[in-house]
């Protein structure tokens, strides 16, 4: 059984350190170190990741928050200022992916760097960062699933439960499911990256990012089906009956894009001329 100790790690007067912020900062630092090492193996420009990461984090977080607020605006109409309270939780990974990709594309055009290569050195850190960041949902007692009696059940305080589940105490720890899934995805991406570094004919640039889209989205479709606080169109959580779960729809789209991307990259790779021996 899991029980959250609460969202605040440390408080001294007006100074408050929240678990959510600590986890995000930890993810960024680990991602910077890892991506720098992967960039060196791809022989990318020195210092490229260090220059990119602050912009990428900033605009990804903004995109993630805007995406979430756009679909949950009914919760902010009376107090719009609360839309800025990102430390209270409420970000969406698909918004971060959209904003982050656009930021990266513009950055690579500005610095004249290969977009697909840079993307490939970032996605392992992204998967690992998601595995770490999902624990922020645990400390905030949010993004949990339907009630359950499994041994790994998660206790949710009464104040954080939806009205229709007010009498239930234990729920699916969907944060844990996604954290484990992302950690396994990270291991897969690192293994593929190392294999591709040894045999560049076997893994075209951009393939790693396509694998990320397919595998992450596959797990997200399943996990999202368990959650009782999904972003919906045509209905409201927790049931979302008759509506569309946005994360499942976006995940399905990204899976298709990832599969088409792999097909296109492998097709392009086969069409490239083979270097002649001297």
Image (spheres, rainbow, N blue to C red):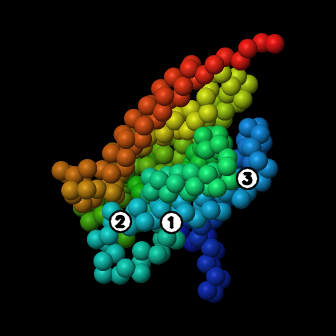
Q: Is residue 193 left or right of residue 214?
A: right
- The residue that appears at 70% across and 22% down in the rendered structure is 199
Q: Residues within 10 Å of mark 2 (few under 14, many from 20)?
A: few
Quarter of image, res 255? top left
Q: Give whichever of 101, 275 is nearer the camera.
A: 275
Tag 2 residue: 70
Between disc 3 and disc 1, the foreground one is: 3
Q: Secondary structure at mark 1?
A: helix
Q: Secondary structure at mark 3?
A: helix
Q: Earlier in the sequence, mark 2 or mark 3?
A: 3
Quarter of image, res 260? top left
Q: Is residue 44 visible?
A: yes
Residue 176 at x, y = what percent?
50, 48
Q: Is residue 185 visible?
A: no
Tag 3 residue: 48
Residue 14 at x, y = what percent?
61, 86
Residue 190 at x, y = what percent?
66, 35
**Quadrant occupied by the C terminus:** top right
Q: Residues within 10 Å of mark 3 (few under 14, many from 20)?
A: some
Q: Is residue 116 left or right of residue 246?
A: right
Is 243 located above or below residue 236 in the figure? above
Is 189 located above or below residue 48 in the figure? above
Q: Give whichever of 261, 141 is nearer the camera.
A: 261
Q: Secondary structure at mark 2?
A: helix
Cβ–Cβ under 8 Å for marks 2 and 3 = no
Q: Earlier in the sequence, mark 3 or mark 1?
A: 3
Residue 50 at x, y = what percent?
73, 57
Quarter of image, res 29? bottom right
Residue placed furthest toward the left: 242
Residue placed furthest toward the bottom: 13
Tag 1 residue: 62
Q: Give whichever of 239, 201 is nearer the camera.
A: 201
């Amino acid at each position: 059984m899991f029980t959250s100790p609460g969202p605040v790690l440390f408080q001294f007067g007006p100074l408050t350190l929240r678990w959510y912020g600590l986890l995000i900062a930890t993810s960024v630092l680990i991602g910077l170190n890892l991506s720098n090492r992967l960039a060196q193996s791809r022989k990318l420009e020195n210092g490229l990741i260090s220059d990119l990461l602050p912009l990428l984090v900033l605009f990804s977080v903004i995109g993630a928050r805007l995406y979430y607020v756009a679909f949950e605006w009914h919760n902010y109409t009376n107090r719009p200022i609360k839309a800025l309270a990102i430390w209270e939780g409420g970000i969406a990974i698909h918004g971060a992916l959209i904003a982050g990709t656009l930021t990266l594309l513009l950055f690579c055009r500005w610095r004249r760097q290969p977009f697909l290569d840079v993307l490939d050195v970032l996605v392992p850190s992204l998967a690992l960062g998601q595995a770490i960041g999902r624990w922020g949902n645990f400390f905030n007692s949010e993004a949990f699933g339907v009630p359950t009696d499994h041994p790994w059940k998660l206790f949710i305080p009464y104040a954080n439960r939806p009205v229709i589940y007010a009498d239930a105490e234990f729920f699916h720890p969907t944060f844990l499911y996604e954290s484990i899934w992302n950690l396994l995805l990270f291991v897969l991406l690192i293994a593929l990256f190392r294999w591709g570094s040894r045999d560049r004919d076997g893994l075209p640039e951009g393939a790693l990012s396509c694998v990320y889209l397919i595998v992450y989205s596959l797990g997200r479709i399943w996990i999202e089906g368990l959650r009782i606080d999904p972003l919906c169109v045509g209905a409201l959580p927790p049931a979302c009956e008759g509506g569309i779960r946005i994360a499942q729809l976006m995940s399905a789209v990204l899976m298709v894009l990832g599969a088409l991307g792999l097909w296109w990259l492998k097709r392009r790779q086969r069409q490239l001329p083979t270097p002649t021996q001297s």
